[in-house]
Image: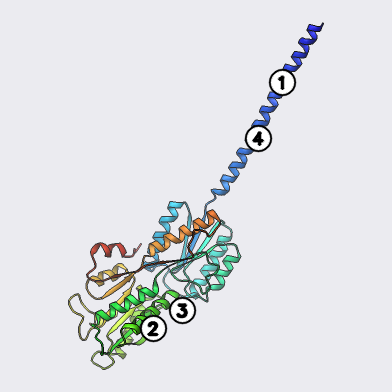
Amino acid sequence: MKRDQVRSSSGRRTRFAGAKAVLSGALAVSSLALISVGSATAASASAKKITVAFVVGAEADPFFISMNAGAQAEATKLGVNLIWQGNPSQYSPSTQIPIVQQVISQLQSSKPSALVLGPTDPKALQPYVNQAIKAGIPTFNVDSSVANLKKVVSFVTGNNAQGGAAAADALATAMGYKAGKKYNVAVGMTSPTATTNVLRFQGFKAEVAKKYPGIKIVAEAYSQSSPTTANSNIQGWLTKYSQGSSTALNGIFAIDGTNAEGAASALQAAGLACSATSCGSGKVALVGYDAYNTNVALLQQGIFAALIAQDPAKEGMLSVLNAYNFLTHHKVKGIKHLITLPNVTLTPKSPAALLTKYTYQTA
C-alpha cells in the first residue's frame, strides 16, 4: 500500500515535472517569438529607406548635372532614395518656388526624408526652408544659401569669394595689366541676389581694389542662366564700348558657366576673342567660371584666359552623406555646419589630366 502510494506519488511528480517542462518550453518559445517579432519590427523601422530630395536652380546646367552625378553615386552607395528636381534651364525664384512646395509635400509622406536646396534667391526661398523645417524635414543648402542659415543643418559650397579674387588676378594678367594704365571691364552674372554670384563679385571687386586700381568695372548684366541672354548682353557691351574708342572694353569676367558660354560666342562672332598665341590690342580678354566641356575646349584654344573650376560632384556627394548621417543618427554632432570647397584656376597651360579631372559632366 505504501509502496503503491509512493509509486503513485512518484508518477504524479513525474507527470507534474513533465507538464512543468512543457509549460516552461512553451513560455520560452513564446518569449523567443516575442523577441523575434520585436527585433524584426525594430529592424524594419531602422531599415526604412531614407529619401533625400535635391531642388536646384537650372538642372540642365552642366554644373548641376555633375552635382547630380556625385549625389547619385553616394545615394547608391548608402542605399538612399534620391529625388532630383529643378527647372530645366531657368534660374529664378519664380520657377523654383513651385517645385520646392511640391517636393516638401512629397517628403512629408515619405519620412525619414531630407531636403537639399540650392536657393536661387536667399530671401525669396527662406520661407520655404522655414516651412520644411517646421514640417519636421531636416534641410540642407548646397552651392547657394538662404539668408538665415541658423536652422539649416549644413551648407556645402565652393569658396566663391576666393574664386572671384582668382578671376581678377587672371583677368589682370590676360589684359597685360600695368600700373598707371586704365582698363575697362564688364561682368556678366546670372542673378543679382544668388549668394554664389554675390560673393564672387565681392571677391572680384575686393581684389581689383586691392591690387589693380587701373581696372574700372563699366558694366554688369544678368542672364538668369541663359547663354542666349548672356550673348545678347555682351553684344550690347561691345557696341557701347567699341574697340578703337577711349572707352573700349578690355576684359570680361563671366561669373558662371552659362555667362561664360554666351560671352565666348559673342566675342568669337565679333572677331574679338583672344587665341592661344595672341590676346593683344583690339582683343577682349575673357575669364570665366565653371569648367563646362565646351568652355574647357575654348580654354585650350586661348579664347578663355582662365576658367575657375568648382567641384560640383563633391558638393552633391557631401550633401547626401550629411543628410544620411543626420537621419541615421538624429544629431548634428560630426556634421560641419559650413563646408567650403576650394576652387581651381585652369589655364591653357594646365596639364591635360587636371583639365580632365575638373571638366563637368554633360549627362
Q: Which residue does the numbered mark 3 point to in the structure image?
A: 193
Q: CA distance from mark 2 to mark 1?
A: 93 Å
Residue at x-position 68% and y-position 24%: 21
Disc 2 element: strand
Q: Closer to the observer: label 1 or label 4?
A: 1
Residue 99 lies, with reference to residue 324, above or below; the image says below
Q: Quadrant of the C terminus?
A: bottom left
As shown in the figure, which amino acid type bears the numbered disc 4? Ser
Disc 3 element: loop
Image spot of residue 98 (x, y percent):
53, 70
Q: Which mark is residue 221?
A: 2
Q: Which residue does the numbered mark 1 point to in the structure image?
A: 17
Residue at x-position 59% and y-position 45%: 42
Pick whichever of labels 2 and 1 is earlier in the sequence: 1
Residue at x-position 44% and y-position 80%: 192
Q: Quadrant of the N terminus?
A: top right
